[in-house]
């Protein structure tokens, strides 16, 4: 049985076209490369680790103590969702299986 045709959406103009693999441009506007699979939302847990300023921990300092009084202290866990395409999800899961922990900076 043949795999069903997957369609992807151009992030530039919204055109939908069949997923043709990597390095393919949008047939409508020329944007490229097109995504290779529609991203999906993946449930994740964000575990608070540290307060930093200028890349240096202030967690156990006079400056950092008030920051840790509320919910934002080591180990606090928040449920969240991130948007990943299939390739990104596989890459993260394989790295985590090998014992690596991805660390992100939160930008609001």
Image (cartoon, grey):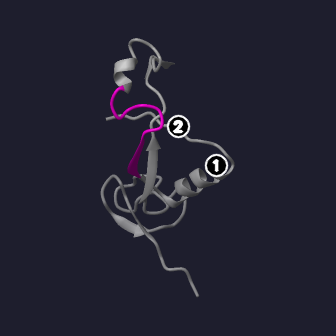
- Name the element at disc 2: loop
Confirm whether the magenta stretch covers residue 55.
Answer: no
Residue range of the region highlighted in magenta in the rendering: 69-81
Q: Nearer the viewer, residue 42 or 57?
A: 57
Q: Name the residue located 35 percent from the left edge and 23 percent from the top edge.
A: 67
Task: Give the left or right position of residue 87, taking residue 26 as reference.
Answer: right
Q: Quadrant of residue 14?
A: bottom left
Indicate the quadrant containing the N terminus: top left, top right, bottom left or bottom right.
bottom right
Q: Quadrant of residue 2?
A: bottom right
Q: Nearer the viewer, residue 85 or 35?
A: 85
Provide the residue designation for mark 2: 103
Residue 82 point in image, percent of width and height: 41, 51
Confirm whether the magenta stretch covers residue 80.
Answer: yes
Indicate the quadrant containing the C terminus: top left, top right, bottom left or bottom right.
top left
Q: Marks 2/1: CA distance?
A: 12 Å
Provide the residue designation for mark 1: 95
Q: Main secondary structure of the magenta part?
A: loop
- Identify the disc placed on residue 67: none
Q: For mark 2, does the 10 Å Cα neighbourhood hold few (<14), some (14 to 19), or many (20 or more) residues?
A: few
Considering every residue shown, the one lying at the far top of the view is 62
Considering every residue shown, the one lying at the far right of the view is 98
Q: Name the residue located 40 percent from the left edge and 35 percent from the top edge.
A: 106
- Name the element at disc 1: helix
Q: Nearer the viewer, residue 25 or 105?
A: 105
């Amino acid at each position: 049985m043949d795999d069903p045709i997957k369609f992807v959406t151009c992030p530039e103009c919204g055109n939908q076209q069949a997923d043709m693999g990597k390095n393919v441009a949008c047939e409508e506007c020329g944007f490229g490369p097109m995504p290779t699979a529609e991203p999906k939302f993946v449930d994740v847990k964000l575990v608070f680790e540290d307060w930093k300023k200028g890349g240096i921990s202030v967690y156990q300092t006079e400056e950092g103590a008030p920051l840790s009084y509320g919910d934002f202290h080591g180990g606090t866990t928040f449920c969240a969702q991130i948007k990943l395409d299939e390739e990104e999800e596989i890459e993260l899961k394989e790295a985590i299986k090998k014992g690596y922990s991805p660390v992100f900076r939160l930008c609001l």
